[in-house]
Image (cartoon, grey):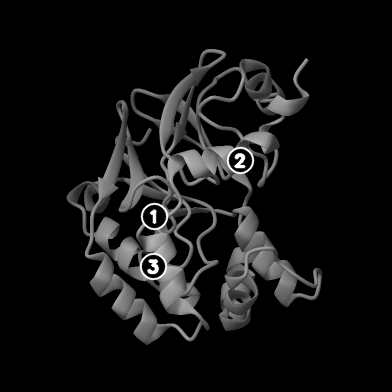
Amino acid sequence: MLNRVAVLSDIHGVLPALEAVLADPDVQAADRIVLTGDITAGPQPNQVLDRLIGLGDRVVWISGNADRELVEYRRGQRESIPDPIAPWAAEQLREDHLDLLGSLPRSLSLSVRGLGKVLFCHATPRDDEEVVLVDSRLDRWKEVFGGLDDDVRTVVCGHTHMPFVRLAHGRLVVNPGSIGMPYGRAGAHWAVLGPGVELRTTDFDVETASAQIGHDSGYPGISEWTDYFLHARATDEDALQAFAPRDGRDHAP
């Protein structure tokens, strides 16, 4: 059983934000660093992957929909990706990166002190791009939890880039938020598990980070990208309004 687990989600290829979080003493002391997907689709995909690979077996990897889409794009299994930066990011990846991303599981379970058996996934336990939100109705949670073992009492997911903790049908649900593309407020958002749950925000110098990314990344329009995402121009209200129709609430009886 693990004593402390750091959960990093939705890094989206932003190395300065990742480095700021990895420097935190609680991340350095964690038994495991769990990545809950969408690791690479952003301005510094190779740099982020190489940094994480260098951490060795402490890192537990889970695929997100964006990671899957990058691999599918490069393997000729799809012709486009909705996120404008994703096709560019896919073209940057080396073959060893593609092999790694293509081999990642969609979910996995770990035992964590104080929380018992914890299931980690990207969006929901059954799908890597379904949407569930802090205010999703209980019937929606029951639906996406269908088939889970009864001994899974905590579910950790990412995907929507907004941190929250809530109960749903007796299970604790944790979304750590996003490292590289936060919605609602700036900073790199992540979580610590064991024996409880702590949502964390690591602040970093956005202007310095933007300059570094601009120097390192060849993505066209990188200045606009970093300005929008590193400053969290999308509010939590904006994000909830955009995501809400996708959690099935409009079709609820």
In this rendering, is residue 67 above or below 119? below
Tell me what residue is drawn at x 62 percent, y 35 percent: 244
Q: Quadrant of the N terminus?
A: top left
Q: Earlier in the sequence, mark 2 or mark 1?
A: 1
CB atoms at circles 3 and 1 under 8 Å apart?
no
Q: On the picture, is 210 further left or further right than 164?
A: left
Task: Mark 2: give few (<14), some (14-19) or many (20+) Cα within 10 Å.
Answer: some
* Residue 126 seen by the camera: yes
- Which amino acid is tagged 3? Asp
Residue 49 placed where, x, y %?
A: 46, 70
The disc placed on residue 227 is 3
The residue beneath circle 1 is 232
Q: Is mark 1 on a helix, strand or loop?
A: loop
Tell me what residue is drawn at x 60 percent, y 17 percent: 150
Please identify the residue farthest to the left as the structure is shown.
Answer: 25
- Which amino acid is tagged 1? Ala
Tell me what residue is drawn at x 40 percent, y 45 percent: 184
- Along the line of sight, which residue is nearer the eye, 45 or 162? 162
The alpha-carbon separation of the residues under discs 3 and 1 comes to 8 Å
The residue beneath circle 2 is 243
In this rendering, is residue 92 above or below 12? below
- Which amino acid is tagged 2? Phe
